[in-house]
Image (cartoon, rainbow, N blue to C red):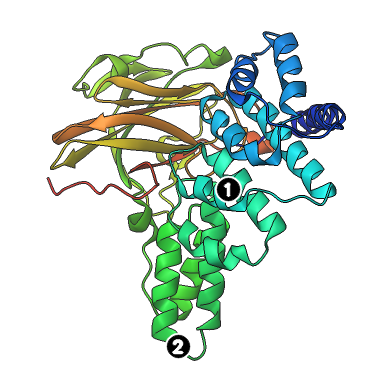
Amino acid sequence: MNIPRARISSFAVFTAILFTAILVAGTTAAAAVDVPPLVQAINAVGPRGAGHVAAIAALKQLGQASAAQIPEILAGMDGANRLSANWLRAAVEAIAQRELERGGRLPQTELEAFLADANHLPQARSLAYDLIVRVDWGAKPRLVPSLLQDPSMELRRDGVAFALNEARKMMDARKPAAAAAYRQALSAARDLDQINEAAKRLRELGETVDVAAQFGFLMRWQLIGPFENTGDCGYDVAYGPEQDAEPANEYPGKAGAVTWIDHTTQHEYGIVDLNAALGKHKGAIAYARAEFQVDNACDAEFRLGCITGNKIWLNGELLTANHVYHAGTYIDQYVGRGRLRAGRNVILLKIAQNEQTDSWAQDWKFQFRVCDQYGTAIRPSLP
């Protein structure tokens, strides 16, 4: 997620205050503390001061925990909200720093066991990994190859970086092996820079690369619009395409009747440019509809990259709504979770555009894919 610079600065200041408070609280010899109730108090912290007094007291006590209890505190992050997870992270980092400054040791075996359990919160596992390599850099080449398909995108990035580096070493002397290595890296990559590198190197090796197929971007859509959104009035209005399970051919639009058009994008990353497909409009709503057929019912993630406000429905069920305009866009930016039923499924997207006139606020586009929880494409069966 793109976080405004001011928020990053505020978070850094707040984390520094927490970090200092824990270190000060832990100047006495570390001893085992009763972690669960302290973690519970911290996980109850909320916005606008809710639970802060009890959480700060708990945090100071948690700062006196021994380094051996770090894995237990990390496990407490599994039930954390975004705010409390940051508090617990600050506690773990402060305890680790204090232990290392005293010449002590971190519980590396237990941290590696924690890292290996993908059921834990990805951010907690990433922190465990950071602590492991902080005290044992030699652990990195041993651990990183196993991260190539990790559900934590931070850890997976390290795994892909390692795979790309290994593939580069083979480029000159072992081209078939290099191609296989780059294919493996491409299938695991989720960050655009790593995807681009793997695809570029494969093409240099004479390989054909279909990035859209690799990641399961939907390329064929039915589109309709524009509908009214002047003054942001239309985001929560259920226009015709939202009301009809089988949309009619024509609806009243922003400036007259609008009809569905068939559209196939040729963009390598499945980007549908609504300005190009429907005409450039401001203060407008567009809908995109696709049918997705699978042989067997399965849980799935519906991942959208979109620079403007959006909603995703699956078979009439709203999966996610994101009322944001021009805050940046990237692959898998928004995730809705649902269950594909065996046979025909209908995906409906609502893509809003506001009236900003800045040059950077003119894009009206999206990209969309269906995948499993690890980001592996779920491919539709033939109709």
Residue 362: x and y in percent read 60, 35
Residue 88: x and y in percent read 66, 29
| Residue bearing the label numbered 2 | 174
Total numbered labels:
2
Q: CA distance from mark 2 to mark 1?
A: 37 Å
Q: Circle 1 — which element? A: helix
Q: Residue at x 70, y 15 (%)?
A: 55
Q: Residues within 10 Å of mark 2 (few under 14, many from 20)?
A: few
317 in relation to 157, above or below: above
| Residue bearing the label numbered 1 | 111
Residue 329 seen anywhere in this rendered image of the structure: no
Q: Quadrant of the image for the C terminus?
A: top left
Identify which amino acid the numbered label 1 is placed on. Answer: Leu
Q: Which residue is nearer to you in this view: 258 or 351?
A: 351
Q: Circle 2 — which element? A: loop
Residue 195: x and y in percent read 50, 60
